[in-house]
Amino acid sequence: MGKGGGLALRKLFAGADLCIEDLYLLEPFQIEYLPGWLPERDLACVLWAHPPIDRFLRVRCPSVSQFLDTTKAHHPPSSDRTAVAQAEEAVVWTIADLIVYNKCPELYDSLEFHNWDFTEVTSITPLDGKVVVDVGAGSGRVALEAAETADIVYAVEPVVRLRRFIREKAAHKGLCNVHVLTASATTSPCRMESPTWS
C-alpha cells in the first residue's frame, strides 16, 4: 500500500485538510482521470472499505465501472485498519490537486505560480473593449485580470466550486462584465462557426 502518496502535493497544499470523503467532491470528468493515475492497490483498498464511495464513483461516472471492477478483482479487501488508512492517504494525496480545486479553491488561488505579471498578456495584445474567453478558467486569475480592461469576459470552467469562486471574486471586485459558463475545453457552451472567407 502507498505510504504517503503525493509528497510534492502535500508540500504544495500544506494547509489543506483532506480526507477520503472528499472524493465525493469530484466532478465526472475528474473521475475519468483516475484510471492510470491512482495506485490501483490503494484504490481497491479504499473501494472495499468504503462501498458508498465505490457506488458514488460508478454513478457519477459510469465509464470507470469496468476499471473499478478490474481493480477490485486484482486486489482483495484488507481488514488491517492501518493499511486502509494508508491507502486512503495515498489516494487522497495522489489526486490532491483535484480535491483542492473542489474543496478549497482559495488555497489553489494563493499558490505562487499565480503571481505572474498580467502585462505579459496585454503587452502582446491590448484587451480594451475586447471580448475575452478564458477556457479552463480555474480560480479566475486570468478572467478577472482581463475584466479590468476588456468589454466582456467569459470564464469557461467545468468545476462547480471554481465557478462559484470566480463569481464571488468578481462580485467582490465589482466586476459586472464577467460571465461564468459551465463547460470545458472539449465541451463548448457556444456553437462555434467557421469564418466565412470572401
Image (tube, rainbow, N blue to C red):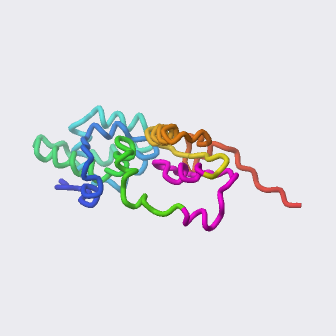
Q: Which span is picked out in magenta?
A: 119-148
Residue at (76, 54) in percent of width and height: 194
Judge from the rendering whether residue 131 lies leftward or rightward of residue 186; answer left or right.
right
Q: Nearer the viewer, residue 94 or 34?
A: 94
Location of residue 131 in the rendering, given as x and y in whole percent from the top left corner: 68, 50
Res 37 → quadrant: bottom left
Judge from the rendering whether residue 127 lies leftward or rightward of residue 78; answer left or right.
right
Location of residue 173 in the rendering, given as x and y in whole percent from the top left corner: 51, 42
Say if 138 sits above or below 11 in the image.
Answer: above
Verify whether residue 114 appears in magenta. Answer: no
Q: Nearer the viewer, residue 7 or 65?
A: 7
Q: How many marks?
A: 0
Say if 112 sits above or below 140 in the image.
Answer: below
Res 179 → quadrant: top right
Residue at (27, 46) in percent of width and height: 16
Q: Nearer the viewer, residue 67 or 133?
A: 133
Res 50 → quadrant: top left
Q: Is residue 73 visible?
A: no
Q: Nearer the viewer, residue 138 or 35?
A: 138
Judge from the rendering whether residue 121 lies leftward or rightward of residue 88; answer left or right.
right
Location of residue 1 in the rendering, given as x and y in whole percent from the top left corner: 18, 53
**Residue that sits furthest to the right in the current view:** 198
**Residue that sits furthest to the top in the current view:** 52
Q: The C terminus appears in which quarter of the rendering?
A: bottom right
Say if 116 sits above or below 132 in the image.
Answer: below
Location of residue 51 in the rendering, given as x and y in whole percent from the top left corner: 27, 34
Q: Is residue 18 visible?
A: yes
Residue at (53, 61) in percent of width and height: 118
Verify whether residue 135 appears in magenta. Answer: yes
Residue at (55, 48) in percent of width and height: 184
